[in-house]
Amino acid sequence: MADKITLFRYLKSRPSIWLSAAEIKSAVSLPDRTLRRWLNELVLEGALERRGNRKATRYQWQPTATANAEPPPTSPAQKTHPHHGLTFSPANAILIERIKAPIYTRSPVTYSEEWLEEYEPNKSAYLAESTRRELHSLGKRSPLFAKAGTYIQKIYDRLLIDFSFNSSRLEGNTYSLADTERLVLLGAAAPGKPNAERIMILNHKEAIRYLVQHINTLTADEETIRTLHYLLADSLVAAGAAGQIREDSVLVSGTTYTPLEGKERLRLQLLRLLEKARAIADPFEQSFFLLAHLSYLQAFVDVNKRTARLASIIPLIRGDYVPQSFVDIDQAQYLEATIAMYELREAGPLAEVYAWSYRRTCQRYDTNVMATGFDEIAALYRQQRRALVSDLVRQQVPPTRISEWVLANIPSSIETVHREKFLADVLAEVENLDSSRIGGLGITRQELENWQKLHDHDTRTTLRDLRDEWDR
């Protein structure tokens, strides 16, 4: 079997050729999993460029890559160490060093309206053109049934978990990924954790749900941003402050930056930056612009960076791109990059963090989708299916009338070609209905128990027969 040096030399000898994984494997004998891992590592190191998705994925060696030195041989005894954050480019590393100086040696600065005014949509750019091309190639996904904005249904649960976990972690939340998954999907709080941490994560869940449910009508306007803040900040800020532009001044710890003051000034500046954001055609540039300028303005009394992170995924999911979930970002690097923007009005370090994390995010989503499989029709109509089952339980429909009742109440939004599959999915949901589905369906335990009392001992057999009859 070949080693990593052999792979490295093979790719380096073909610098101008786009190669598929199958073509590479035919020349370099490696197990599929090992080959994928090493190709991903070379992409992250900048030695390879990747474009396309799934079977259309192609790799090309980068002659100017910084990773041109051959990797050292790896012995079986060597351990693989996890990657802890990115390595900033030399120019951005200099900026980071400047804001690492003792705070008393750094000059006090305040909000600069000029920094926003200098930005011209579709002329200025924080993300380099080559970076934008790469992110487009990595992140674009086909919408379900050619309906724009529906790719998000495919990965909704994963988005809830990954975004809630990573965004909360960047704020110092100590919930683990597994803890977050149990809380988001099952409602089970981690023992011994502060209540505020639980609320922070559940607020993320509610805000993401709102965003996804309304994604076809949402845009980056004042109402949307204030609604996202309301959902993210509820119970975590003073009564009445959630969703409201602040009246009081705020201090940002760890920096010499002082945000703008005055409610009307803040609102006008928020409107200006959102108008510019909506004018940006490139979804990744618009995404990063929202992340940077909403964080910089600090329009709310708290929860500004969380609001900026969630707002930044609007243009991505509307365009059927993998949503940025801020995967694997080192908390210290994120904070340093943000402070560099506050104090120096330099977006370069934060842009580098954003692009680095987006590459990791795409890898994670692809891995999870391939590992779990996916039923496109079930995902497309998940809300209608759950609503129908919830109504069936609340109305106490008996087993002998389930098929008739479902047929009479099938939503008009279900396309004709999908009706048979939708009905089969509803009957399967009913057949497996138990207490584990209470939270997802929005019914109470008492409603479920009352409905179950209507059933005799062969209810499940009856439902299976109904499904078989429908399938025939």
Image (cartoon, rainbow, N blue to C red):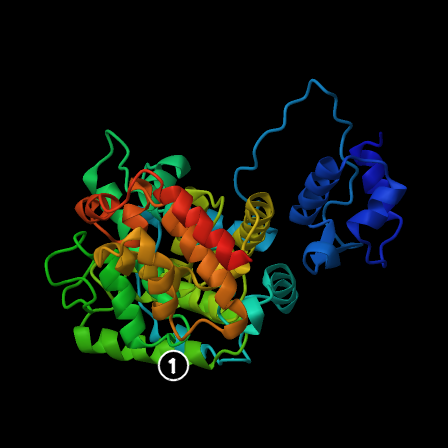
- Residue at the left extreme? 239
Determine which quarter of the picture holds residue 6. Answer: top right
Q: Which is more toward the observer, 275 or 382?
A: 382
| Residue 103 at x, y percent in the picture | 33, 47
463 above or below 317? above
Dot 1 alpha-carbon crowd within 10 angstroms: few under 14, some 14 to 19, many 20 or more: some
What is the three-letter code of the residue carrying label 1? Glu
At which x and y percent is residue 169?
A: 37, 43
> Where does label 1 land, which residue?
275
Q: Can residue 95 be seen from the camera position used here?
A: no
Residue drawn at point x = 43 percent, y = 79 percent: 278
Residue at disc 1, secondary structure: helix
Q: Which residue extends farthest top?
A: 77
Residue 206, percent from left and from top: 29, 57
In the image: residue 129, left or right of residue 102: right
Residue 345 position in % (x across, y down): 42, 64
Residue at left offset 54%, top offset 49%: 93
